[in-house]
Image (spheres, rainbow, N blue to C red):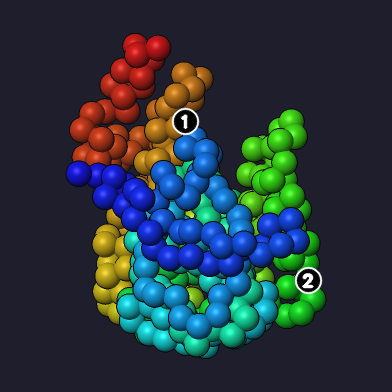
Amino acid sequence: MPLASLRQNHLVGTALEFTEGRLHEQKCYGSYADDMPEPDFRFRIAFVQHDGDFKMHAHEYSELVFVLGGRAIHRTEIEEYPLETGDVFVIGGEKKHGFKDAQRLNLCNVMFDPEQFLSDRAELEEMMGYHALFDLQPRTRSGDRFQERLHLSPENLAYAKSLIMNLKVEYGSAAEGRRLVIASAFRLLVAFICRLYGQEKEDTVSPLTQMAKVASYIQRNYREPIRIEELARIAHLSVSQLQRKFRRIYETTPVQYITKLRLHEACELLKDPNNSITQIAFHCGFGSSSFFSTQFRQSMGESPSSYRGRRFNQR
């Protein structure tokens, strides 16, 4: 039975939610079906208040959380750490978390489906902060995430609040272009905090930032020759340490990761018949059309020309 079916109508807990200037009790089920009113637009934003404890729970969707006031101990399966005004963190889908000893903890919870809202994210993936906050931090098993969290200054928190309030107003409206504005505003908010994280942690050497810097460097430069030694230098690791840590996090090697990015772009370029196989090979960083064809066949099970022909025959 699908996970969503198991979760449907299974109450996770309740929270006090601010709506139109008033507090009311809001139930949380943790599933797309129950918590997201629009199945083809899985997004929700809520201002909530917690006092006391909130049991450990998980949800299908991801959650971007801004601490707007109050205090609490945030609990995960691997650690506990104090929250304070200005903290920002991401909870990935299926990751258990909860709160204890909350004292008027005011949060903005931005709930979203990553497949719908972060699927076309090429420029975001060039940002170190994106890899740290939205990719590595939500799923890392490291116990030092508290030291690597994003904490906004009062000035930056004020700007983030203005973006959040605009997003909340649009979410509650029925205006023309509502979905377009929400998606755009969400991207702006994500880009803002990712940029801040990169600026704040630029000189930080930690397990999270090491891999985030490597991943963002690869995203920016995969069309060019990339030496493993250069990636190791960026991460302040030996080549063997980099290989080991990268494989543990991404379940692949750096070379395979780079090749996957190149092949993904090649598949997109093959859709245009005006792009020759040789042009695509050099543009994507393969060095020669023969090497490109070999790598493509090993990954896709067919040649680039066969892939292109099959795509056009399906139209």
Whether 217 is drawn above or below 98: the answer is above
Pointer 2 with pointer 1, Cβ within 8 A:
no
Left or right position of 5 against 285? left
Which amino acid type corresponds to the residue marked 2 in the rendered image? Ala
Which amino acid type corresponds to the residue marked 1 in the rendered image? Leu
Q: Residue at x 63, y 44 (%)?
A: 183
Q: Nearer the viewer, mark 2 or mark 1?
A: 2
Comparing 61 with 308, the one in front is 61
Dot 2: element: helix
Q: Residue at x 28, y 21 (%)?
A: 306
Q: Residue at x 44, y 71 (%)?
A: 137
Comparing 284 with 153, the one in front is 153
Left or right position of 98 against 163? left
Q: Residue 204: in sight, yes or no?
A: no
Q: Residue at x 72, y 41 (%)?
A: 173
Comparing 56 with 133, the one in front is 56
Disc on res. 147: none
* Label located before the other in sequence (2 or 1): 2
Whether 30 is drawn above or below 79: the answer is above
> Which residue in the structure is indicated by mark 2?
158
What percent of the width, then of the height, locates residue 210? 45, 76
Comparing 298 with 294, the one in front is 298
Q: Residue 10: in sight, yes or no?
A: yes
**Image quarter in which the C terminus is found:** top left
What percent of the width, then of the height, locates residue 292? 33, 39
> Which residue in the structure is indicated by mark 1?
269
Tell me the CA gap for discs 2 and 1: 42 Å
**Image quarter in which the N terminus is found:** top left
Instruction: Give the image quarter of residue 57.
Output: bottom left
